[in-house]
Image (cartoon, rainbow, N blue to C red):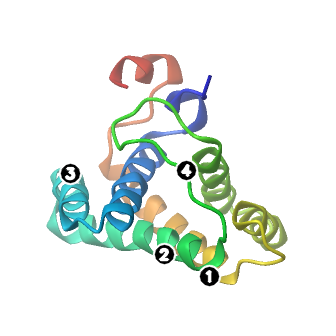
Amino acid sequence: MLPHLTSVCADDAEVLALSVLRFVAAGYMTSDVACWDAAYDGVEQVLGPLEGPKFIAAMAGIMRAIRCERQDDWRFMPATCCRVTEDEHQLITLIALARQRRRPEEVEAQAARLVKAFEAPRLTASVWAAAEVLGAVKSQLIPEVTASSRAGLH
C-alpha cells in the first residue's frame, strides 16, 4: 500500500506543494489547461493573487525540470488523493532537504536519484528556488498541526 500523505508531508506547505505538483503534472499529461487553472484557483484562494502565482511558478519549475532531466515516466496521484507514489515521496524528501538548508551535495545527490541520472542541475536549482517560496508562504498557511490531526483532512 502506498504511504499516506500525512506521513510524507511535514506541514501544510508540503501538502500544498504536492497538490500543485499533481495539478501541473496532470496538465502536462493531458495537455489540458484546466489542470493548471485548477491549481491557480486553489492556491490563490489560500495565498492570494500575488503570492499564489509565485507558488505555482515554483512548482511548475520543478515539474519542468523533472520532465527535462528524467527519462522514465513520472508516477503521480490525483491532486486530492491521500496516498503518495514513490516518485512523489522522493520529491517531497528532496524539497524537505532544501527547506532544511542541508548541504548542497545532499540536495544534488537526491535530485540525481530522483531523475535517475548522474546529475540533475535543473531540478536542483528549481528545488532550491521552491524551498525559498515555501518558506515565504508558510506563515500564510494554517498553523502546523500534528500528522494525526491532519489525517482527517485527507
Q: Position of residue 53 (x, y in %)?
A: 26, 70
Q: Which mark is residue 122?
A: 1
Disc 2 versus disc 3: nearer the observer: 2
Residue for point 60% across, 28% down:
2
Nearest to N terminus: mark 1 or mark 4: 4
The residue pinned by badge 3 equals 42
The residue pinned by badge 4 equals 75
Q: Position of residue 70 (x, y in %)?
A: 65, 71
Disc 3 versus disc 4: nearer the observer: 4
Q: What kind of residue is marked 2?
A: Arg
Mark-to-mark CA distance, 1 and 2: 9 Å
Mark-to-mark CA distance, 2 and 4: 14 Å
Label 3 SS: helix
Q: Position of residue 81 (x, y in %)?
A: 39, 33
Q: Quadrant of residue 47?
A: bottom left
Mark-to-mark CA distance, 3 and 4: 22 Å
Q: Are marks 3 and 4 in contact (CB under 8 Å)?
A: no
Position of 107 with respect to 66 (left or right) is: right
Residue for point 30% across, 51% down:
140
Q: Are marks 1 and 2 in contact (CB under 8 Å)?
A: yes
Nearest to N terminus: mark 1 or mark 2: 2
Q: Are marks 2 and 3 in contact (CB under 8 Å)?
A: no
Q: Which mark is residue 64?
A: 2
Residue for point 59% across, 28% down:
7
Disc 1 versus disc 2: nearer the observer: 2
Label 3: few (<14), some (14–19) or many (≥20) C-alpha neighbours in 10 Å? some
Q: From the viewer's side, name the closer residue of 39 and 152.
A: 39
